[in-house]
Image (spheres, helix red, strand yellow):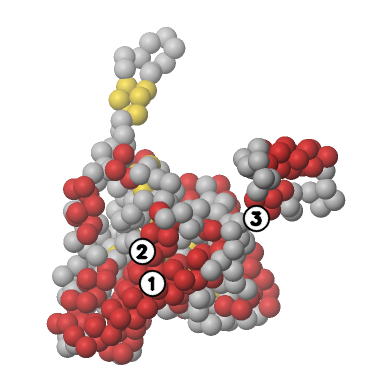
Amino acid sequence: MTVESTAARTPRRSAGSKAGATGTKRTTRTTAKKDAGTEPQLVQLLTPEGKRVKNAEYDKYVAGVTPDELRGLYRDMVLTRRFDAEATSLQRQGELGLWASLLGQEAAQIGSGRALRDDDYVFPTYREHGVAWCRGVDPTNLLGMFRGVNNGGWDPNGNNFQLYTIVIGSQTLHATGYAMGIAKDGADSAVIAYFGDGASSQGDVAESFTFSAVYNAPVVFFCQNNQWAISEPTEKQSRVPIYQRAQGFGFPGVRVDGNDVLGCLAVTRWALERARAGEGPTLVEAFTYRMGAHTTSDDPTRYRGDEERQAWEAKDPILRLRRYLEASNHADEGFFAELEAESEALGKRVREAVRAMPDPDHFAIFENVYADGHALVDEERAQFAAYQASFADEGGN
């Protein structure tokens, strides 16, 4: 299969009007949304039909993957998807305030997550539930923040997995700084920063690219291009494929099929190997698709059609690996049945854990605003208390 494309997308053209004394008036014509069924040039080791394809550059990074490890990758994706579906249902039932689904992005997260060593450090966004799974974070610990009872239910240093970052793109700067520290310490570990196509438009990301390049920081920038920054398509965010932006900062970029777990594993291992060898940063663009809403507060049917989604459903990362496992006789019906039972048990555990959590403390929003308190905050707290009291019945309950 073809590897990364070096050709930029066709530039948008400007249509000029008749030039006058004040110059030429120019308007921009935006290119149409690319056909969802069109395959871009990218690194791909496993086709949507589940066929293994050779790649001279990246095959060596997955040459030692055993059938047991392949089944493990499949298990990771299935259980991550089940957890994600359960969390979405819990939000719809009012148990969570919000949820950001990873549906469709399981291969990108599991493939890259399993490429990491224990001493590598991860800086996630708010959607890296699959990477958290790979780092050993209990999935139920991810849900407290979305219920509003904590700011993150795990110790970042216990799993080398930082707390979720809500501010778009800022974690890339944190990752770069941490990687610069690793280099100064002389350690051979690496850092990976996750972000999306929308975050690639943020100034923080450009700054992190600059610093990491200048200081040769051992960091991998892993961009999950899921085609939509909420309702804004990638074509309106970048004139060139995202991975090509790395060239301007002086380090390599590569585009991988984000629905191919083997491809993501191989490319991430390559990028991490570069980082540990002192060769500096790498930008990985995982070309994937957000099958669900941006978050549960979003309605994707308002800005994209069924045809696009159906085209991507045919590239489903879990079905792709299952086809390969079955065709290679690496898994039988007994394995899939046991995994289904394990999936059901996980769903039940997640439901019970969330419903056992306390209700959010409504007054927590007034904490950690000022170090020593403030009259304005005190006034707002009193107003909020009076508002809540207005709902009390005559008995004061």
Q: Nearer the viewer, mark 1 or mark 2?
A: 1
User: What kind of residue is marked 2?
Assistant: Ala
- Disc 1: CA contacts within 10 A as few (<14), some (14-19) or many (>=20): some
Q: Quadrant of residue 22?
A: top left
* Distance between mark 1 and mark 3 Cα atoms: 26 Å
Vertically, is 8 above or below 256?
above
Q: Position of residue 5 (x, y in %)?
A: 29, 59
Dots 1, 3 in contact, CB < 8 A? no
Asked where in the image residue 317 lies, by quadrant, the reply is bottom left
How far across and how far down the image is residue 300, in percent? 33, 45
Pick out the residue farthest to the top. Answer: 21
Residue type marked 1: Gly
Three-letter amino acid code at disc 3?
Asp
Q: Nearer the viewer, residue 380 or 397?
A: 397
Residue under pointer 3: 361
Which residue occupies 65% across, 55% down?
Answer: 361
Location of residue 15 with respect to 116 vertically, above or below? above
- Residue 110 % position (x, y): 39, 73
Residue occupying the point 18% across, 48% down: 307
Sooner in the amino-acid sequence: mark 1 or mark 3: 1
Tag on residue 80? none
Query: Residues at badges 1 and 2 in contact (C-beta under 8 Å)?
Result: yes
Mark positioned earlier in the residue sequence (3 or 2): 2
Residue denoted by label 2? 85
First in sequence: mark 1 vs mark 2: 2
When the figure is inspected, residue 300 is found, relative to residue 121, above or below; the finding is: above
**Residue located 29% across and 66% down the image:** 259
Query: Among all residues in the image, which is located at the extreme right?
Result: 372
Q: Mark 1 points at which residue?
A: 347
Q: Examine the rendering and report whether any part of residue 132 can be seen.
A: no
Task: Give the residue drawn at x 19%, y 55%.
Answer: 311
